[in-house]
Amino acid sequence: MRYLLDILQGAGLAGATGIRPFLPALGAGALASADLGVDFDGTQFSFLEAQGFLLALVVALIVSAVLVRRRPAAEGRVEAALAGIGIGLGALLCAGSLDDRHAAWWPGLLVGAACAALASTAVRALLVRTRARLDAGARAALPAYAEGAGLVLAVLVVLAPPLALVALAFFAFLLLRGRRREGERYAGLRILR
């Protein structure tokens, strides 16, 4: 049972980094350094709560925010890079969550990467659809909302790991609904021919 809770915690953390990578990983590292719900000390992933790593996350968060603000034309490339970083961080956080109490941590790498990829794909598609309907000011605030949502999810799954199931189901729903809408839109275009 403890293994299941730890893998759910790791999957939820991975999903949170799939939304946006830096603030959720920073939140998980801060909780781990305070030993609140997660602890990476004594594991192969102890660097996830080290001050140097947390400082690097803060710098990366600031750099990514500046890049998105100053170069809106490069936003797609920055988002793609953030998605890749989120998948990597999600894999590490999930494996670290398992390594805290269990010898077999390597499944966390696979589960974490998959959960982060699911969240990233679903949320990026949602943000693209939402961005198209907003004015410039609201569009600029979307990354901050995504960072906040990722942080809230990370804290919630550390405190209550079963909430990861709800989050992952929501990401799957978003992904399927977005793909269905795309299919309906293109079906309408075929009818116009």
Image (spheres, grey):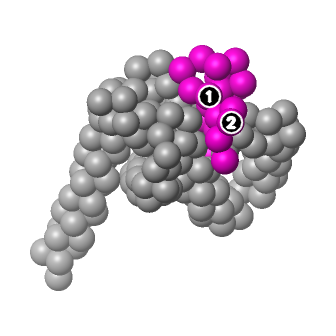
Characterize the local packing of mark 1: few (<14), some (14-19) or many (20 or more) Cα atoms within 10 angstroms: many
Task: Give, as a three-letter code, the residue at label 2.
Answer: Gly
- The quadrant in which residue 53 appears is top right
Indicate yes or no whether the magenta region holds residue 40. yes
Task: Give, as a three-letter code, the residue at label 1.
Answer: Asp
Determine the residue positioned at 62% across, 28% down.
39
- Quadrant where the C terminus sits is bottom left
Relative to 95, say whether 73 is above or below: below
Q: Which mark is residue 77?
A: none
* Residue lying furthest left: 191
Determine the residue positioned at 71% across, 56% down.
72
Q: Nearer the viewer, mark 2 or mark 1?
A: 2
- The quadrant in which residue 20 appears is top right
| Residue extent of the magenta highlight | 20-44
Determine the residue positioned at 64% across, 57% down.
85
Determine the residue positioned at 33% across, 41% down.
168
In this figure, which residue is indicated by the disc labeled 1? 39
Instruction: From the viewer's perspective, tell me whether residue 149 is left or right of residue 65.
Output: left
